[in-house]
Amino acid sequence: MSVSNGAFIHDISGCMAAHVGYAGLSDEDLALYMEMAREARARLCAMHKQHSLPLTRLPQKIDDLASCKMAAMFLRDGASDIVFLGTGGSSLGAQAIMQLAGYRVPGCEARIGARLHFFDNLDASTLAEALASLPLPTTKILVTSKSGGTPETMVQVLCLLGALESAGLAPANHIVALSEPGDPHRNPLIRLARIHRLMLLDHDPHVGGRYSALSSVGLLPALVAGLDGLAIRKGAGDIMQAVLAGDNASPVVGAAVCVALQEIRGMNVSVMMPYADRLRLFSNWYVQLWAESLGKNGMGSQPVAAAGPVDQHSQMQLFIDGPEGRLVNLIFPATQKQGPRLPDSLASDPMLGYLAGRTVGDVTACQQSAAVEVLMRNGRPVRVFAVDRVDERTLGALMMHFMLETILAGFMMNIDPFDQPAVEQGKILTRDYLAAMKS
């Protein structure tokens, strides 16, 4: 069974018992969980109609475009280096989007020309080295915190504020802040922005961090990198419209398959494995989305980030021959006949002749086919997302698919896919330990 969404084809045939045996779903299993998924879809559509879930309205949003363009121009103007401060949902979506422009793609430079730095993890050595090596006069900074009080991000921005002032530089000429509107007496980032007269953009208070990639949290970095932010939203809109239009949209089918495999077949691991360098950070974004949204009340499944074809030489051994209990999600760009072509003269080579006249993309296409076949032969559930190209519209569609699939799965499991109570416990304890620490 496959579902076409324009940007990609979602094929779940590798999750069915007819292809993978007892580890897969029967037609009756799928029908039962599709009915549950349709009920979850009805709930989602009702929230959309009532305007109570702003995520579903982001694809058509344009009123934040002018401020994002202005901030992007400010960040790019004269910058040799652009630093992005934020953690979790305030960073992972932006990184996944900016990888389209070459960020952390081997051998490529981001289209913007400036060096891009994401400080998404608090590490004393890393921050010290950055402060010592960044050319501060030509460094611009975007700091993102929905609450305005994320401790890791506040530590980073305070250090950079101090470094700028020590260098005799005005922070207002270097920093843009992005936070939900509110009281500066309750929101430290807003207070700092006002004290230092920083450019300040609004983060939608009703869009949670891990669901914010389509908001200004993702749109502004996309514009900084020279990407088409509206195309990202257009791709997301295609998926949203498909969900509103019918019960068999890809996120609905996906939620049914994921929850059914987990509850009936014990698939407690979900692997995300795209076959494109420009989608490798998409896997990291997915890991947070799935884990933080659904890992509650003893429920959920463990997400794993992987990449193809490189992990066919490492993690795939475990996926195929290790313990059972995992669903493998493969994203396959169309690569056949693409890339450099190998010489025909190889045809007479006894060891390399099989490569004669093939393109690099031909090799990857065959690796994709081999991955699916070997997983199914060994009774390991696998589903495939086949995309024509890796671009802004496709990425927007994939992001919206998995956000909606995650929400629908949460509804089906009777858990809240929007909160993160266990994470909040850790934040509270961190503050308590800091308060009790001796100077």
Image: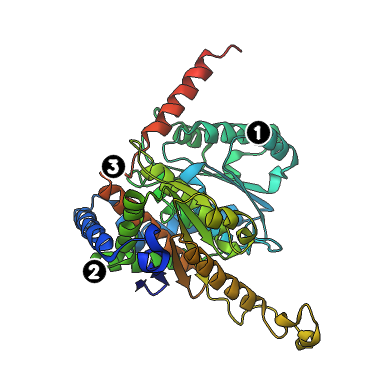
Amino acid type assigned to the residue bearing label 2 in the image: Ala
- What is the x, y in percent for residue 53? 27, 51
- Whether residue 200 is visible here, answered yes or no, is no
Q: Which residue is mark 3?
A: 415
**Rendered view: 115 above or below 429:** below
Please give the name of the residue rendered at 66% of the width and 39% of the height, measured from the top-left corner. Answer: 169
The answer for how far apart the CA atoms under marks 1 and 2 are is: 54 Å
Task: Tell me which corner region of the image, top left, top right, bottom left or bottom right, holds residue 28.
Answer: bottom left
Amino acid type assigned to the residue bearing label 1 in the image: Glu
Q: Tell which circle, 3 or 2, labels the residue nearer the N-terminal end.
A: 2
Task: Tell me which corner region of the image, top left, top right, bottom left or bottom right, holds residue 152.
Answer: top right
- What is the x, y in percent for residue 410? 30, 48
Q: Which residue is mark 2?
A: 245
Please give the name of the residue rendered at 66% of the width and 78% of the height, measured from the top-left corner. Answer: 339
Mark 3 or mark 2, whichever is nearer to me: 3
- What is the x, y in percent for residue 137? 70, 45
Q: Is residue 435 left or right of residue 54?
A: right
**Badges 3 and 2: C-beta atoms under 8 Å apart?**
no
Q: Tell which circle, 1 or 2, labels the residue nearer the N-terminal end.
A: 1
- Whether residue 13 is visible here, answered yes or no, is yes
Mark 1 or mark 3, whichever is nearer to me: 3
The answer for how far apart the CA atoms under marks 3 and 2 are is: 25 Å
The answer for how far apart the CA atoms under marks 1 and 3 are is: 47 Å
**Badges 1 and 3: C-beta atoms under 8 Å apart?**
no
Q: Which residue is mark 1?
A: 165
